[in-house]
Image: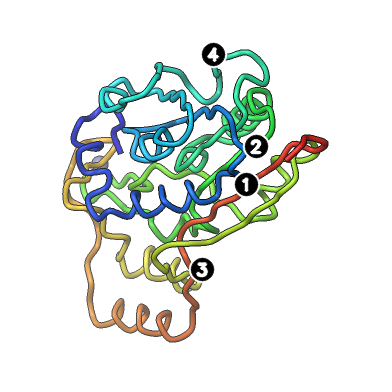
Amino acid sequence: MNFADRQTWENYDKDKQVTRRAEVIRGLIPSDTGNILDAGCGSGIVTHLLCQDFPVTAIDISETALEYLQCPHQVASVTSIPYPDASFDLVNSNEVLEHLSDDDLKTAIAEFKRCAKRYILISVPHQEQLQRLLVLCANCNTQQHPYGHLQSFTQQRMEQLLEPDFYLKRYLVFGRSQRDYNPLLLNFRQRFLGQWYTPDEDYRCISCGSAEFKTRQNPLTKAVNGINLLTMRQRPYWMFTLFVRKGSKT
Ligand SMILES: [Zn+2]
């Protein structure tokens, strides 16, 4: 995904899934919440829903995305939030943390804790199997995640990241079901049969810009996919967690 590209944001909610998630996020915000920081707001699909009921300030690293914002905003990274300690009653961050490196993830969480007076609300993909979505460029052979995801989260991992200052108050999984892939079968299908994930039509290789990816199907890949379909379970793709600062009045 190229966050500086207008096309990324024009197509961001094509299937209205982000709008559905925005409604879930709105439903998780405690009614006594004061002001909100939307950290990593993108083009503001969630922000605009929240600012109907709360004073919201938004930040994002993409100037292109911020052109869509209709509430106070500025260009800034979640790893260096330009506001004093405890400036916001609630820090909201959706679809951000899965894109960060290990170091940036720790820094961003520390920034959320520093800026949030009482609440931190985080939504990320739920136990994403990162390997399953890897695409392989047919031109330069670069492996890549088509949505730029670097992190996978469980409820437990999220709790560990937020403790000891914050405790988990609400946990919810939601959204379209995704099926895990048996790791051994997946490895076999990708490395030996040459079938990798099929990216969206407008996706281009991050390394060489090619639109060609190794996605070929044959009777053997179909058989492997069939075995997986019968043996692996499905679960909702998104995970929502609301954390509360210990000792704060809620
Ligand atoms: Zn390439």
Q: Image check: 35 left or right of 22?
A: right
Residue under pointer 4: 82
Separation of marks 2 and 1 at Cα, in angstroms: 7 Å
Separation of marks 3 and 4 at Cα, in angstroms: 42 Å
Separation of marks 2 and 3 at Cα, in angstroms: 37 Å
Residue shown at 22%/50% (left/top)? 14
Image position, residue 85 (x, y; %): 67, 17
Who is closer to the viewer here, 245 or 10? 245
Work out whether 154 lies above or below 143. below
Tag of residue 242: 1
Whether pointer 2 and pointer 1 mark residues with C-beta atoms closer than 8 Å, the reply is yes
What amino acid does circle 1 point to?
Leu
Tell me which label, 3 or 1, sits earlier in the chain. Answer: 3
Residue under pointer 2: 119
Separation of marks 2 and 4 at Cα, in angstroms: 18 Å
Who is closer to the viewer here, 176 or 182? 176
Asked which quadrant contains residue 243, the reply is: top right
Q: Quadrant of ligand 1?
A: top left
In the structure shown, which secondary structural element does the residue marked by tag 1 occupy? strand
In the structure shown, which secondary structural element does the residue marked by tag 2 occupy? strand
**Given this view, does label 2 or label 3 mark the residue nearer the observer?**
2
